[in-house]
């Protein structure tokens, strides 16, 4: 299984995370990251306060897909602690 570190985020005009930057130096839309997780066997993580945090895919009550470091939370933007790409 391949893995990569999410190091930064990009947001749209409504401050919603739309893309993430990877340690490999590329930026990908959230939809591609979710595809890689579910269909290609990739896993992703990030570092928060020096601790490794696994990244999970979830869907909001209205069906919007998002990434989170807390699989038990409904907080859509839990990656907002990361810097902008």
Image (cartoon, rainbow, N blue to C red):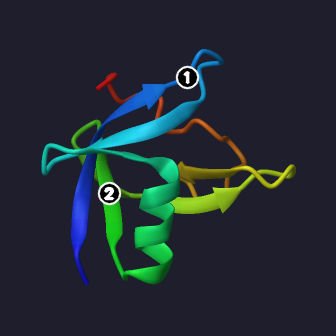
Q: Quadrant of the N terminus?
A: bottom left
**10 Å crowding of disc 2: few (<14), some (14-19), many (20+):** some
Residue at position x 14%, y 43% from top? Answer: 25
Disc 1 marks which residue?
12
Spot occupied by residue 61 in the image (x, y as percentages of width and height): 86, 52
Spot occupied by residue 19 in the image (x, y as percentages of width and height): 43, 39
Ranked by sequence position, the earlier of labels 2 and 1 is 1
Picture layout, residue 84 above or below residue 79? above
Marks 2 and 1 sit apart, C-alpha to C-alpha, by 22 Å
Q: Secondary structure at mark 1?
A: loop
Spot occupied by residue 14 in the image (x, y as percentages of width and height): 65, 18
Q: Is residue 69 visible?
A: no
Picture layout, residue 83 above or below residue 18? above
Q: Secondary structure at mark 2?
A: strand
**10 Å crowding of disc 1: few (<14), some (14-19), many (20+):** few
Residue at position x 60%, y 28% from top? Answer: 16
Residue at position x 65%, y 60% from top? Answer: 58
Q: Quadrant of the C terminus?
A: top left
Residue placed most toward the observer, 2 or 31? 31
Disc 2 marks which residue?
45
């Amino acid at each position: 299984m391949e893995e990569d570190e999410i190091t930064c985020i990009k947001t749209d005009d409504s401050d919603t995370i739309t893309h993430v930057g990877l340690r490999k130096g590329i930026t990908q839309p959230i939809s591609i990251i979710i595809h890689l997780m579910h269909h290609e066997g990739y896993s992703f993580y990030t570092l928060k306060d020096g601790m490794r945090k696994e990244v999970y895919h979830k869907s909001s009550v209205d069906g919007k897909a998002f990434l989170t470091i807390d699989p038990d939370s409904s907080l859509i933007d839990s990656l907002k602690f990361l810097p902008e790409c």
